[in-house]
Image (cartoon, rainbow, N blue to C red):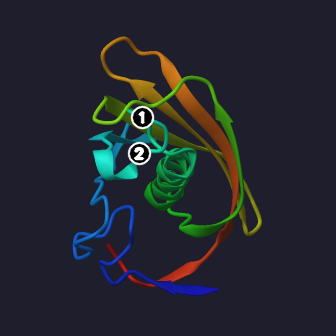
């Protein structure tokens, strides 16, 4: 499978004016981003929508795979919600590749509150390795 990064990704694309524009950096074998979700992604009063939480975790596993040299597309994402993510709350997203088998990349991700390190959500994912035609 070939994929092309054109800068318009909703999660990380710098050219997507409606997107989150998150930036992940490799750090000690994992990929990390710090972020605060804007109020426009609210579900219940003051709480970020669960679909947005899943998107954040999906970005983290994707960037972990990219930084390890195995870019891919998500085939399966299993999310465990532990605490509500509050609108505007400062969080740290961490993604990590667990193993690679043939064309499958197994990865995990967590969202932690920066203020106290509490785990808000975590995920495990299986990505199908892809060949990027344009590099970030």
- Mark 1 and mark 2 in contact (Cβ < 8 Å)? yes
**Element marked by disc 2:** loop
**For mark 2, what is the residue?**
42
Percent position of residue 6, x then y: 33, 84
**For mark 1, what is the residue?**
45
Percent position of residue 111, x then y: 48, 33
**Element marked by disc 1:** loop
Which quarter of the image is occupied by the C terminus?
A: bottom left
Q: Residue at x 41, y 45 (%)?
A: 42
Image height of 84 relative to 36, above or below: above
Taking depth in this image into account, of 135 and 35 the one nearest to the observer is 35
Taking depth in this image into account, of 101 and 51 the one nearest to the observer is 51
Percent position of residue 57, x then y: 53, 47
Task: Give the left or right position of residue 92, taking residue 63 as reference.
Answer: left
Image height of 136 relative to 118, above or below: below
Taking depth in this image into account, of 43 and 3 the one nearest to the observer is 43
Name the outermost residue toward the top.
116
Which circle, 2 or 1, is nearer the viewer?
1
| Mark 1 neighbour class, 10 Å CA radius: few under 14, some 14 to 19, many 20 or more | few
Percent position of residue 126, x then y: 72, 56
Using the rendered image of the protein, determine whether residue 75 is visible from the camera's viewpoint.
Answer: yes
Image height of 67 relative to 84, above or below: below
Residue 90 image-quadrant placement:
top left
């Amino acid at each position: 499978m070939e994929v092309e990064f054109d800068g318009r990704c909703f999660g990380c694309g710098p050219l997507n004016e409606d997107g989150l524009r998150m930036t992940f950096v490799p750090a000690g074998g994992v990929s990390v981003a710090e972020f605060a979700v804007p109020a426009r992604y609210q579900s219940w009063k003051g709480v970020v929508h669960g679909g947005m939480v899943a998107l954040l975790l999906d970005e983290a596993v994707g960037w972990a795979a990219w930084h390890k040299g195995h870019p891919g597309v998500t085939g399966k994402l299993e999310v465990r919600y532990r605490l509500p993510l509050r609108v505007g709350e400062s969080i740290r997203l961490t993604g990590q590749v667990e193993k690679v088998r043939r064309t499958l990349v197994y990865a995990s991700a967590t969202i932690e509150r920066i203020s106290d390190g509490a785990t808000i959500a975590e995920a495990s994912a299986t990505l199908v390795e892809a060949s990027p035609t344009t590099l970030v």
